[in-house]
Amino acid sequence: MSKKNEVILSGIRPTGRLHYGNYFGAVHHFLRLQESDATCYYFIADYHALTTITERKEVYKQTLDMLRTYVACGLDPARSIVYRQSDLPSTAELSLLLGMITNIG
């Protein structure tokens, strides 16, 4: 019997340069998990950044910088799926639907 493949989903808001807390709290684990048998999806949470950054050009700039940082830290797009949260409209749709039926956050 084969082991069931785990699916990992995580992301970081692109609201500035990554710091040691981001690296050791998240990215370090992303790198370890991409070496495992897990299917890894790592996203840039640009929707979440809209609560902090309101200028469209700044959101785009910070998102691109986060992508560069992911790759510079060692995330490999050949082994992990790296994407921008806003590229999947279903993300916002699912959030809306879940918010309608979930009464406690």
Image (cartoon, grey):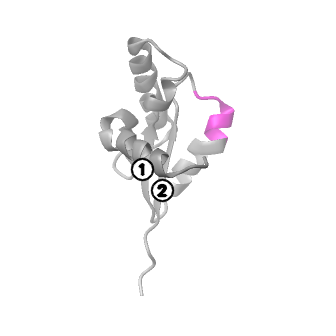
The residue labelled by disc 2 is 8
The image quadrant where one finds the N terminus is: bottom left
Visible in this render: residue 45? yes
The circle drawn on residue 41 is 1
Location of residue 64 by image quarter: top left
Write down the quadrant of residue 44 in the picture.
Answer: top left
Residue 79: image location, x then y, percent: 38, 53
Task: Magenta stretch: give its range.
Answer: 18-24
Helix or strand or loop: what does disc 2 sit on?
Answer: strand
Please tell me how crowded label 1 is: few (under 14), some (14-19), or many (20+) other residues with Cα within 10 Å: some
- Residue, x 49% and y 62% (percent of image)? 36
Give SS at disc 1.
strand
**Residue 20 covered by magenta stretch:** yes
Contact (Cβ within 8 Å) of mark 2 with mark 1: yes
Residue 86 lies in the magenta-colored region: no
Query: Which of 81 and 56 lies nearest the eye of the viewer?
Result: 56
Label 2, label 1: how many angstroms apart (C-alpha)?
6 Å
For badge 1, the amino acid type reads Tyr
Q: Residue 73 at what x, y percent from top left? A: 51, 37
In the foreground, 2 or 55: 55
Q: Furthest-bottom residue in view?
A: 1
Residue drawn at point x = 56 percent, y = 42 percent: 27
Q: Main secondary structure of the magenta part?
A: helix
